[in-house]
Image (cartoon, helix red, strand yellow):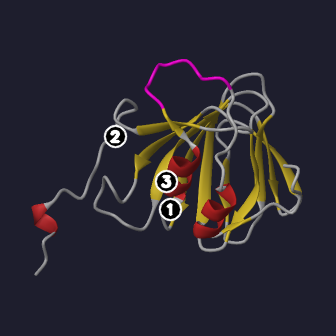
């Protein structure tokens, strides 16, 4: 029996309703988890926002089972995909397909703000595993390292580790 009429097939999440997590070095800043299978009726993607301060970056990595779509709406960045570099800014859309190793670096002097969609979902588990709970409006904490055992979390999430272990 079709039960679609029993639950809404829509969702609105305002910034103060999103689960928010401070991020460790080297990206710092924070992530907001807007849509996950935990809070919506769909189980084929996760979406959210990442805010990175100047100099912050997402280390080189890839995904063996996921595609990642990023829309930059504020700030300037260097994006590297499989060794190819791009300079991007507001209005830029980037798709990281499966197995594409990539880096995102805030090269500007203001926060880099990105909306992302991760298909299938799972990125929420990564951010929860490395982040610390954040309340909207609170000041950014002192920089903190990734937690112990992050390599195991990368394996669970089927991440491709960086070729360069210094990133």
Q: Is residue 140 placed above or below 27 in the rendered structure? A: above
Left or right, 119 with respect to 109, comes to: left
At 39% from the left and 38% from the top, the residue drawn is: 18
Dot 2: within a 10 Å radius of its alpha carbon, few (fewer than 14), some, or many (20 or more) residues?
few
Q: Which residue is mark 2?
A: 13
The question of residue 136 being in magenta is answered with: yes
Q: Is residue 80 placed above or below 4 in the rendered structure? A: above
Q: Position of residue 56 (x, y in %)?
A: 75, 34
Q: Which residue is mark 3?
A: 124
Which image quadrant for residue 105? top right
| Picture quarter with the N terminus | bottom left
SS category of the residue bearing label 1 = loop
Give whichever of 3, 135 is nearer the camera. 135
Dot 1: within a 10 Å radius of its alpha carbon, few (fewer than 14), some, or many (20 or more) residues?
many
At 33% from the left and 64% from the top, the residue drawn is: 42
Left or right, 89 with respect to 8, comes to: right
In the rendered picture of this protein, how many numbered marks are placed on residues?
3
Residue span colored magenta: 134-142
Q: Nearer the viewer, mark 1 or mark 2?
A: 1
- Sequence-wise, the earlier of marks 3 and 2 is 2
Between the C-alphas of marks 1 and 3, the distance is: 5 Å
Q: Position of residue 132 (x, y in %)?
A: 52, 37
Left or right, 32 with respect to 161, comes to: left
Left or right, 8 with respect to 160, comes to: left
Tag 1 near tag 3, CB within 8 Å: yes
Between the C-alphas of marks 1 and 2, the distance is: 19 Å
Q: Which residue is mark 1?
A: 122
């Amino acid at each position: 029996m079709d039960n679609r009429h029993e639950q809404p097939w829509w969702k609105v999440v305002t910034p103060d309703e999103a689960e928010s997590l401070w991020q460790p070095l080297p990206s710092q800043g924070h992530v907001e988890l807007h849509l996950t299978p935990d809070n919506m009726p769909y189980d084929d993607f996760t979406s959210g926002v990442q805010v990175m301060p100047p100099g912050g970056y997402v280390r080189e990595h890839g995904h063996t089972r996921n595609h990642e779509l990023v829309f930059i709406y504020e700030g300037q960045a260097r994006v590297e995909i499989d060794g190819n570099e791009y300079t991007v800014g507001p209005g830029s859309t980037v798709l990281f397909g499966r197995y594409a190793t990539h880096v995102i670096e805030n090269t500007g002097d203001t926060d880099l703000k990105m909306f992302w969609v991760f298909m299938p979902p799972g990125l929420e588990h990564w951010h929860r595993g490395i982040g610390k709970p954040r309340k909207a409006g609170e000041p950014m904490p002192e920089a903190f390292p990734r937690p112990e055992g992050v390599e195991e979390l990368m394996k669970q999430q089927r991440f491709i580790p960086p070729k360069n272990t210094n990133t």
